[in-house]
Image: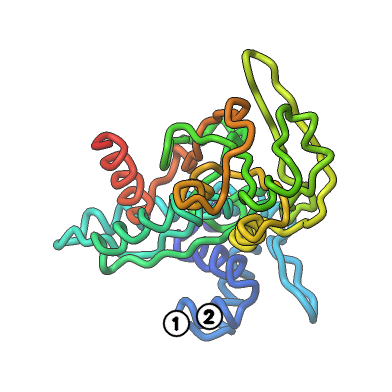
Amino acid sequence: MANRHDLPLDDLQVLVAVCEAGGFRAAARRLGRAPSNVSETVSRLEARLGVPLLIRSTRSLGPTEAGRDLLARVAPLLAEVRSALHDVTGTDREVHGLLKLNVTGAVMVDILPPLIDRFLARHPAAKVELVVEDRLVDAIAEGCMGGIRYGEHLAQDMIAVPIGPRFQQLALAASPGYLAAHGVPLHPHEITAHHCIRMRFSSGALTAWEFERDGQALRLDPPGRLVIGVDAAAAAIDLARAGHGLICTFRNWLDPHLASGELTPVLAEWWPRFEGPQLYFPSRSMPAPLRAFVDLVAELRDGA
């Protein structure tokens, strides 16, 4: 009888494709096989292991607990095998494949787009997919190669590298017209008496209004006359420019409007500084597109 642990890598690859695609037919299209062949392969794998790996129903298909455990360990290894084979057999050293990252919307305004632009120009055979997600999620479990976040607690097997500015600031501003009509707050506690434009994460939480000066830190939760989702941050800034209240957000988002005079800095001596975003990914796996992107980030950082 065949050794139950002597399993063809191809069968495992089929299982990964089925779970990622969410069904036999979708996986078959991806793999260029007949759906019956894909189904038979998974059934053969389950028979050899002696445990069910998929829960099948008329409406859905998903991994069992044993299937999830197996996928969590096998999928990154298969990705590394594919990357290694490509590196060995590639003659032109051109980067192929998909760079898929789970990123917070905060980096999509002015930090990540220029990096992606340079990455695509340097690697014309590569593709990029950015999953913009402001909830704290397991990017790797969601099928991404890595993620970009601010100050997120990382698992021990993760590597994190700075991407973009090392430090950023939270800034408070309003239009000159609004301040002329409503007065300029002289202390953060006076903010609660003003019209405030707040932003809300997709999780439902409002973004923090934090202030810091001479070792004193304050965190305020002022009532919002306007509350706008973070995905529409540009609209929130436009409404501040139009005179509808105070806005507290990333300074780099406000800098162009501060420079033009459309917005006026408020309580600038209280603006806190914090670490910039980080790109994180598993230490055990580095597919070629991710490796190329990490190299680009390091190159730009060292040249800064």
Left/right of residue 300 with respect to residue 180 in the rendered view: left
Within 10 Å of disc 1 (Cα), the crowding (few <14, some 14-19, many 20+) is few
The x, y position of residue 272, in whole percent, is: 59, 28
Q: Quick check: 270 above or below 9?
A: above
Q: How is the image coloured?
A: rainbow
Residue for point 79% across, 79% down:
59
Residue for point 43% across, 53% down:
112
Q: CA distance from mark 1 to mark 2?
A: 6 Å
Q: Does the residue at mark 1 contact the one at mark 2 (Cβ under 8 Å)?
A: yes
Which residue is tagged 1? 32
The x, y position of residue 110, in whole percent, is: 45, 53
Q: Quick check: 101 above or below 301?
A: below
Within 10 Å of disc 2 (Cα), the crowding (few <14, some 14-19, many 20+) is many
The answer to which image quadrant residue 214 occupies is top right
Is there any visible trace of residue 77 in the rendered image? no
Mark 1 element type: loop
* Amino acid type indicated by mark 2: Ala
Q: Quick check: 269 above or below 44?
A: above
Mark 2 element type: helix
Residue placed most toward the observer, 135 or 247: 247
Which residue is tagged 2? 28
